[in-house]
Image: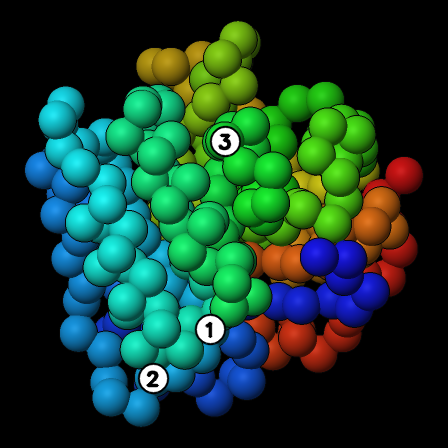
Amino acid sequence: MEMTHTRQFLLTPPQDLPQAQPWGLPLVYLSGQLGPTGQFTAAPLPPEVRGGLLLVGISEAPQPGADPKHAAQAILTLCRARRFGGAVLDVDCPPTPYLARLIRLLDEGLSPSGGWLYLPEAYGAYSKRALLYCTAAVSGGSLRHRLEDLIARWGKHRLVLCLRRTREDFFLPAPTGCGKPLTPEALAALRRQFEPNVFYSRDLCAHYFTYMSRSTGAHFVLFDDVESLRQKRALAQEVGIRQFFLLYPEVADLLPALLGASDAKTPCP
């Protein structure tokens, strides 16, 4: 699927549908869950919901012996009934034979009607057709290099960039590249307490500051605002990525500015 125009999806929990629908973006409904026995459960959706995509959360691989045919059939039936354009698998566990078969069954079931399966980039080898989503949040190196590496491996037409709103606190040194997630209130409290100078990283396309705690030592805080998310989107468009996931309500307060301009002011180098 070669994309020549930008397409943005709003990932939306059922309780936020009334607030998300007026924005006019195609919606991804966070309303499906795969349980440990392989049973698919869908949260109730209003009768008028049609179109968009269905997101299925998979936090752990189903138990050995579970048959993915039942879950695949239930997901495909819901997609047909609601006229969804495809399904997004939100997988938070390592690959297993069950998941490999589920991916194959969904891909085959969606293909005849022109539907699409969306997978985490780490699962890209399990389907030659599925679209692959990756995060725009990087804590080291270069976002440009990261995207270029992904394009070289999978092709730009298969990639979807998740514009997640980063707020992380890293203890220094941070060899794993993983920080502690911060709530908006915690981030604001740190800035009030330490009054740090805030800088912008053109490599990471994110804002950052450092502070020193008497009890835990040196810290590095990385966070996004509307301008950094616009810069990430602009960089992705520059290298050829045309599809984006936005998570509501994570970016709800930023949507007026994010959707008011299709490109950032200046792309990252």
Residue with the mark numbered 3: 126
Which numbered marker is on residue 52? 1
User: Looking at the image, is 201 positioned above or below residue 192?
Assistant: above
In front of the other: 231 or 158: 158
Residue under the image location 76 percent in, 74 percent down: 261
In front of the other: 230 or 217: 230
| Residue 211 seen in the figure | no
Picture coordinates of residue 161, whole percent (x, y): 62, 49
Amino acid tagged 3? Tyr
Amino acid tagged 1? Gly
In front of the other: 215 or 62: 62
Picture coordinates of residue 80, whole percent (x, y): 36, 73
CA separation, marks 1 and 3? 23 Å
Q: Tell me how many marks there are.
A: 3
Quadrant showing the C terminus: top right
| Residue 173 seen in the figure | yes
Pointer 2 and pointer 1: residues touching (CB < 8 Å)? yes
Residue with the mark numbered 2: 49
Pointer 1 and pointer 3: residues touching (CB < 8 Å)? no
Quadrant showing the N terminus: bottom right
CA separation, marks 2 and 1? 9 Å
**SS for tag 3?**
helix
* Local crowd size for mark 3, using a 10 Å CA cut-off: few (<14), some (14–19), many (≥20): some
Residue 104 falls left or right of residue 14: right
Task: Report the mark closest to the observer, 1 or 3.
Answer: 3
Q: Quadrant of residue 195?
A: top right
* Local crowd size for mark 1, using a 10 Å CA cut-off: few (<14), some (14–19), many (≥20): many
Q: Quadrant of residue 14?
A: bottom left
Q: Quadrant of residue 49?
A: bottom left
CA separation, marks 3 and 2? 30 Å
Picture coordinates of residue 71, whole percent (x, y): 22, 50
Residue under the image location 67 percent in, 68 percent down: 7
